[in-house]
Image: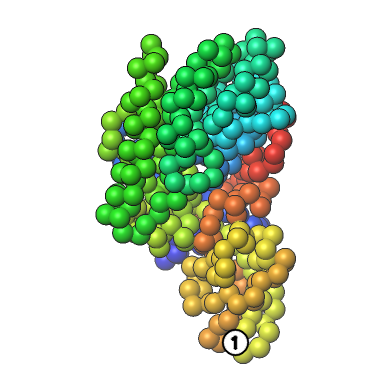
Amino acid sequence: MHEWYKIDNIDQIDSPALVVYPKNVAHNIELTKQIAGDIDKLRPHVKTNKMAEVCTMMLQSGIKKFKCATIAEAEMLGTVNAPDVLLAYQPVGPKVSRLLNLIKAYPNTRFSCLVDNMENATFISELCKRGNIVLNIFIDLNVGMNRTGISPEKALHLVKQIIPLENIRIVGIHAYDGHIHDENVEQRQKASDISFALANNIFQETEPLFSYPLALVMGGTPTFPMHANRHNIECSPGTFIFWDWGYKNMLADLPYQYAALVISRVISLIDKHHICIDLGHKSVAAENPLPRVHFLNAPDAKPIGQSEEHLVLEVADSGLFKTGDVLYGVPVHICPTVALYEKAFIIKNHEMTTQWNVVARNRYIQY
């Protein structure tokens, strides 16, 4: 009996390569919908998958709202007619014009973006006015990530400053709490309660200033199950779609399945206890210390050295391997790993059937 990940026609795939299992992707989508309870609470982040076909799978499952981090990801969502796309990034400089070009090019998609200061809000509004566009924006709050966003105590003042601007329209509050990833569920719940309280206080102060309901967007993969139980909130998990070793071993309460792997081959038998494979820095995310990948069919192999095109593994007995052997690896961090590949090989019933372009790995598609 084959292990679930084994590929019968593996000789048709050169290594290193990214492989995706749509059956597991579908499982992860359905599990996310179950956890959310209400599909309207979901606004998945597409930074992990960067593939139009995966986004189409989410659309076909009933998900209508999405989040992204780059203009290319936003454009990818426009090409598949995603109804609602939040660029979870404050555009500056040429990015503003690029976003406005997307709004004109994809009229069936409702685009929005983040803002966290008045100077940039004014700049965006002025460009929108020149283009005869009214752009929807979310006020970005810093609730502990300390990366972007305005301090909560200053947010209401910013809202009141922005309201008179004619060509941008506040539609919600955004608060990413990516600093929360406690393994203990109770601790993660307590930490997410604190971040939610900060955001909700601003939300409650802000919403009465408008004649229409606002949205509150919070949570990545670790905290979205906590936020999904709250009223009037949109959750933005991203890594869930493919899953990885890091979250698998950190978030034991979330039974997602690996849906994307990297395949590699043994290229040299160094000595009795060391082998080398073709999985270098260019093929798996290298921002974490070793090990950066774990092998499903060689679980005891220990990565001890890596360079651009090589990964040296310590093994119990190199005699158990031969050059050309295929190793199936689970990256510690899948999101930046996907971005290293131009395409993914699609595996169905143990066969490579087609390829999907990792179209949004580039900073530009057209716009």
The picture places residue 72, in percent across and down from the top left corner, at 65, 34
Amino acid type, residue under disc 1 in the picture: His
Answer left or right for 276 relative to 259. Answer: right
The picture places residue 279, in percent across and down from the top left corner, at 65, 66
Query: Considering the image in quadrants, where does the N terminus appear?
Result: bottom left
- Image point (57%, 70%), residue name: 290
Dot 1 falls on a residue whose secondary structure is: loop
Q: Taking 54 as reference, is 350 above or below it?
A: below
Closer to the camera, 132 or 298?
132
Q: Kindly identify which residue carries mark 1.
A: 273
Closer to the camera, 364 or 177?
177
Q: Taking 315 as reference, is 359 above or below it?
A: above
Q: How many numbered tags mark residues here?
A: 1
Residue 206, can we see it? Answer: yes
Answer left or right for 255 relative to 144. Answer: left
- Image point (59%, 41%), residue name: 50
Q: Taking 354 as reference, is 298 above or below it?
A: below
- Image point (55%, 50%), residue name: 335
Answer left or right for 248 relative to 90. Answer: left
Residue 61, can we see it? Answer: no
- Image point (66%, 52%), residue name: 340
Would you identify the image quadrant in which residue 235 lies? top left
Q: Taking 270 as reference, is 100 above or below it?
A: above
User: Dot 1: within a 10 Å radius of its alpha carbon, few (fewer than 14), some, or many (20 or more) residues?
Assistant: some
The picture places residue 197, in percent across and down from the top left corner, at 32, 38
Answer left or right for 347 relative to 41. Answer: right
Query: Considering the image in quadrants, where does the C terminus appear?
Result: top right
The picture places residue 316, in percent across and down from the top left corner, at 53, 86
